[in-house]
Image (cartoon, helix red, strand yellow):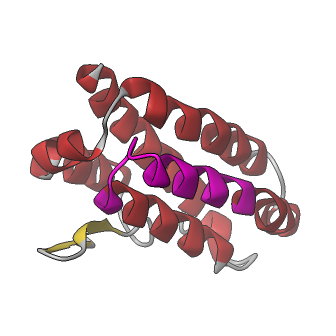
Amino acid sequence: MSTSRSPHQGVSISIRNMQPMEIVKAVLENNYRYFYSQIKSETSYRKIHEILATILDTAEGMNSNDAISFLKKQLPRVYVIIEYQNARGQIYNGLRDLLINVINELLSANASNIKNENLIRNARLLIDSLAVIAKEVG
């Protein structure tokens, strides 16, 4: 499993080469308290989740080349929203860093690994797992 924690960077979870249940456990079991502390309100996370989920769902239905092109056009918008929510203090730096890393992993993907490594599906699973925690934050 590709998770790590350092006191300065928070928790890092890679969507590459992880099995779906490993991602869920990394968020909901191993690091639940940490991520709970990173979300100020459900609404603040939901704004990020809704846009990113829509982009990921659309890309998942495309062939690999079209998905790469689509993600490169759409993900910068999510990046800005993440930074905005962080600047407003609605999400904290650890969650910001994790989400930016997920975006960077998607942007660095190529046509052969975007689908073979299930990067889009794993990213969606990660943000959905975080949504469970956000719902409990309220």
Residue 121 visible in the shown view: no
Q: Quadrant of the C terminus?
A: top left
Say which of 32 and 80 sits in front.
80
- Is residue 91 within the magenta segment? yes
Say which of 33 and 129 sits in front.
33
Give the x, y percent position of residue 92: 32, 53
User: Looking at the image, which residue is at 22% across and 54% down?
Assistant: 26
Give the x, y percent position of residue 114: 65, 69
Location of residue 67 with respect to 128 vertically, above or below = below
User: Looking at the image, which residue is at 26% across and 55% down?
Assistant: 22
Write the start and end of the magenta stretch as one range: 76-94
Give the x, y percent position of residue 119: 55, 62
- When asked about the image quadrant of residue 107, the answer is bottom right
Q: How many marks?
A: 0
- When asked about the image quadrant of residue 136, the answer is top left
Q: Quadrant of the N terminus?
A: bottom left
Q: Relative to residue 76, is residue 12 drawn left or right? A: left
Residue 52 visible in the shown view: yes
Q: Relative to residue 45, is residue 9 drawn left or right? A: left
What secondary structure characterizes most of the magenta part? Answer: helix
Say which of 1 and 69 sits in front.
69
- Is residue 138 within the magenta segment? no
Location of residue 47 with respect to 124 vertically, above or below = above
User: Looking at the image, which residue is at 64% across and 80% down?
Assistant: 108
